[in-house]
Amino acid sequence: MKDNGCYLCKSDTKYLFEKNNRKYAKCLSCGLVYIASLKDPEKTELENHYSQKESTHQEKLNKKEYKKLIKRMEYRLGIIENYCHSKGKLLDIGCGQGSFLDVAKNNGWECSGVEISKNDCKYVREKLNIKVHNTELSGVNFPDDYFDAITLWHVFEHFIDPLTELKEIHRILSPGGIVCLEIPNIDSLAFRILGKKWKYINDEHIFYFNKKTIGRFIKTSGFKLMYITGISGFPWWGKYRGLKELIHGFITATGVGDHLVLVLKKI
Ligand SMILES: [Zn+2]
């Protein structure tokens, strides 16, 4: 495919498919999948889209949905706390309405967020009383070695220039600090079956990773991979719990779940 070569390794790419007038390419060498046809005006459009996007309206969730959301956030926090010796400063990039930050704060972390959406920032500040910066990460200019943990929950695949973002994350993270991210898994069973109809192939996602390609990003950016798993959505509770956990366990063990969860350490 005629573009400037792979974003990550500069090798030649092949055309994969087209969706919503966007061409998707796969690197012939490293296997990275991404939207190859994204040009500057579209990048600006995407940024405007995020800043004006409707909020998720966490307050509209019913009791059951809210409970499920909190369980999910506690699961995420548990992963981080497995790798952190103490609870210090935590930054959630793309924090949305701050449900993860709220859980972390209630568990003793000193929390702040970065979020492009004005509405979400207002919610986080006023309802949760958590510090949030209404800009992109590069717009804040945090001090060097500042945070003990940085999280990105389904945010990394949205970045137009993920290597630059990782470099900035590395700079503001304390030595030995932890990054935890969750991204869609292009090696998932669902993508293999559904192809471009897979729910994560959408206009907001620029890069699509598997264990190998995300591993290369991490290595290039000065991090050590501490933990990686492919999970089937999130752990399930409620009805048919036993059966659901069995399926979840199987998908996690085979690494073909929809999501990859990773823990990185700054070296
Ligand atoms: Zn490549």
Image (tube, helix red, strand yellow):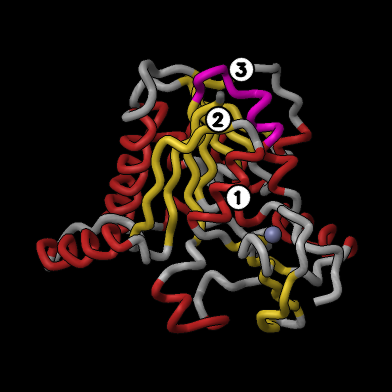
Crowding around mark 1 (Cα neighbors within 10 Å: few <14, some 14 to 19, many 20+) is: many
Q: How far apart are marks 3 and 1 (CA)?
A: 20 Å
In the picture of the structure, the residue carrying the numbered disc 1 is 156
**Which image quadrant for residue 123?**
top right
**On screen, residue 50 above or below 120:** below
Q: Where is residue 144 in the image (x, y as percent from the top left)?
A: 69, 17
**Which image quadrant for residue 100?**
top left
Task: Report the quarter where the C terminus lies.
Answer: top right
Disc 3 under 8 Å from ligand 1? The reply is: no
Q: Residue 171 magenta-drawn?
A: yes
Crowding around mark 2 (Cα neighbors within 10 Å: few <14, some 14 to 19, many 20+) is: many
Q: Type of residue at label 2?
A: Leu
Q: Which is in the foreground here, disc 2 or disc 3?
A: 3
In the picture of the structure, the residue carrying the numbered disc 3 is 146
Query: Observer-nearest residue: 195 or 118?
Result: 195
In the picture of the structure, the residue carrying the numbered disc 2 is 91
Q: Earlier in the sequence, mark 3 or mark 1?
A: 3
Q: Earlier in the sequence, mark 2 or mark 3?
A: 2
**On screen, residue 221 above or below 9:** above
The answer to whether residue 122 is seen in the rendering is no
Please report the bounds of the magenta region as a residue range. 167-177
Query: Observer-nearest residue: 241 or 123?
Result: 241
Q: Type of residue at label 1?
A: Phe
